[in-house]
Image (spheres, helix red, strand yellow):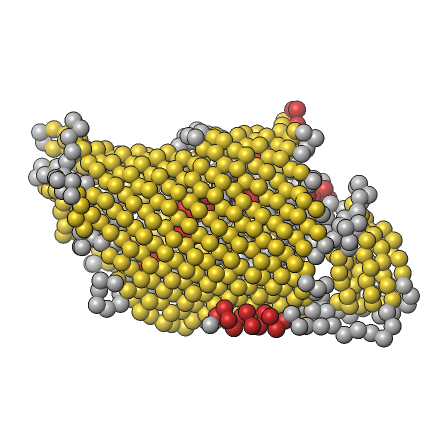
Amino acid sequence: MIRNTALLFILSLFTLTSFGQARQIVLSGTITDAEKSEPLPYATVSVYNRNGDLANGGIADENGIFKLNVSPNDYSLNFEYIGFESITTDVKRYTNSTNIGTIQLVSSVESLEGVDVVGQSADVEIRLDKRVYNVAKNNLIRGGTVSDVLENVPSVSVDIDGNIELRGNNNVRILVDGKPSGLIGLGGIDALTRLPAESIEKVEVITSPSARYQAEGTTGIINIILAKRFLKGLNGVFNLSAGRNDTYSGSANLNYRKGKFNFFTNSGYSDRTNKGRAVQDNVYTNPLESVERYVEERLFNRRRQGFNVNVGLDYQMTEKSSLTMSYLTNERDGDDRTVNEQSQYQINGVLVTNRYEDEIDHEDSNQFSVDFEHKFNKQGHKLTATLQTEKNDETETSDINSFFENGQPSDDSEINTTVESQERNLAQIDYVYPINKNTQFEAGYRGTDNKRIIDFEVEIIDENNIATNDENLSNVLDFEQEVHALYTQYGKKFNAFSFLAGLRFENTRIFVEQLDSSSPLNNDSHNDYFPTLNLGYEISPTASITLGYNRRISRPSARTLNPFQSRSSKTSYFQGNPKLDPSYSNGIDIGYLKQFKKVTLNTSVYYRKSTDAVSRVAVVTDETVFVNDIETPVIRRLPINLGTVEQFGVEFNTSLRLIRGMRTNASVNFYRRIEEGNYQGISYDTDNASWSGNLSNSYRLPFDIQSQFSVRYRGPSESSFGKSKGFLYTDLALSKDILNDNATINFRFSDLFNTGKYDYQTTTPVAVTDGVYQRREPTYTLTFTYRFRQEKNRQRGRRGSNGQGDFEEFEL
């Protein structure tokens, strides 16, 4: 229903026509590069009347020559080209056909290298409802993945488990080009490791989303924008990387433009191996059978091998209508090997066993999307529509075996198999109407349907090596969620003051069923309203202040609802909670931007309160298991709607150019988190203050070697069931341009000093657990980048690629 209705509506838009005038004149000219005097093919030309309405528009030909038919009148002309500063002429009367002459555009990268602009630089753009970070030139991400990109973005961090966090909170929505993506698939955030960093052009950090954006994600939205280029003919970028632990990758961003057609592909292959380590030291308060202490040391060897191919076509149907079609396929194989050395400390000695887990998985993702845009006569007046369908399948098999220290097998062996399938559909329509130059109205619809089936089977291996299905641990979960949303927002600018007010309505239907159960685990439908408000005031040409308010929602995922037990350890397991409810939050964000001659300061104060907040707790069960014939207590970890969470903090971001050839970026986030709630008669109230920071510096060394380093610090923290220490993470990169600047060699070190280790302690009535977890060991990567038919400083992304639209009139 969603797809059919939206498709008919989009097709009906193709019949839009424009009205002609009795007498026409021709405005013509040539658009060139100001530095090299070379033509800029397919540059955009727009003609506006005295009222600011679009009278006509089009693109230059492959030689930069344009010709536009208009009626005799007063006009101003606007000239644009990707990676160059736009030019707008003064209003002038044209009564006869006129050759405007040669219009020379200046590269926007070059113009920004010597001067910092308020709210915008080569690194960051500040807008009313988001910050846009241009990461394409960051050497610290070369040869890495999207996770490496995000770790180097202010306000964003990756926790020790690989989860993306925004301002210290992992309840954040991840989008690719403004939409859910098959690049993420069933693997969640872990799937971001399969996308090469070189395919990313920008990252949008949206801490105060307007009503235009979906309300999911209480902390905000991170939108990853893929690179796409528009230069004439065939051009592109190739990347080859090799690194420690037999890690190899290659990617290609290719583009071919001719006439009204633009073909593009963003593809890559990777074979990455990450090694890690985890230690859990459990000291029991009431030992069973003389076991006073139980220590587990796990060594991980995770290999991810796969490829992704994204191909597409842009078609300029008319001067005002365009169509983009793209297809993505993503295939991945995983091979994880874990050795778990288990030591049971008894009065009469220590008993050691080794538990081996071999996990093999395979995932296929396929996605097809269609995007349509129509621009009306008035500048900024447009309608966009999107249809997208996605299918993901994954099979995962774990073979677990245990052996005593002398090599003899124990009675603890099993095979776990998980088969998952997911289908997601999206239909979206957005309409933007500029009432006048300083006033804008928006409205739109968005519908999503997410169906997911998880089949989990546990087979126990007996002493005769015969596998028997354990019906108490095996299950099949059927999950479906539909969200239908309508939104509207209104914005206006009064001299130095601007505002954007909106309201979003979302209807959610969720159905969760365990197929071997007689009744659904969760069957709910609810309606919600999400108001938003963004205010901006320009104090001076070099200073501005913003204020944002929004209401958000966090819906439980299929994984957190699934009641199956994790099987990596017999004495401690994670289990989903099918009774989880959505969590709601209200947030306020006040920002201040100040531009000095060589320093840019961007700071914000924020507050957010969440109700029915989801937290993970560790509880003592009535279960005990026999490990080597010794009875041992079992601890269960599960998510619950614990209570309320209040988080407020201060964030500072600054950019400095104090020395020629050096640029320094620093960010620090001080925050306090107050959590209140009870579960099973136990209070989990906590009051935690912590901070995190990021310092990066780039400097040009002798022989034109560019150096860049980054230091990230995550402060100590406390939760309702434990605490953790702070840790430091350092990266270093060196790069050198070769082959007449057509190629670059980059050498990157990750976790240079081997300090990225998570040191924590949890406490339950049964045991006190001290642990250390290292997600991956230090790595180094060598990357070779080659560019052809493309200049180094013109690697610019597509306009309007966020899939949501920009409130261009109200940027700061």
Nearer the observer, 560 or 494? 560
Left of 318 or right of it: where is 580?
left
Q: Which residue is drawn at 55% across and 64% down?
A: 386
Q: In the rendered view, would you say 670 is above or below 559? A: above
Nearer the observer, 474 or 172? 474
Q: In the rendered view, would you say 778 is above or below 43? A: above
Q: In which quarter of the image is the C terminus?
A: bottom right
Left of 758 or right of it: where is 668?
right
Left of 56 or right of it: where is 518?
left
Q: Position of residue 715 (x, y in %)?
A: 41, 41
Q: How many circles with numbers are drawn on the protein? A: 0
Q: Which residue is drawn at 53% across and 64% down?
A: 387
Nearer the observer, 468 or 78? 468
The image quarter containing residue 515 is bottom left
Q: Where is residue 226 in the image (x, y as percent from the top left)?
A: 56, 49
For this orientation, the residue located farthest to the right is 96
Q: Which residue is drawn at 23% across and 68% down?
A: 519
Q: Where is residue 126 in the image (x, y as percent from the top left)?
A: 61, 53
Q: Residue at x 48, y 50 (%)?
A: 329
Q: Position of residue 72 (x, y in %)?
A: 87, 69
Q: In the rendered view, would you say 805 is above or below 135? A: below
The image quarter containing residue 772 is top left
Question: Would residue 757 be seen by someone viewing this image from the given angle?
Answer: no
Question: Would residue 357 be seen by someone viewing this image from the given angle?
Answer: yes
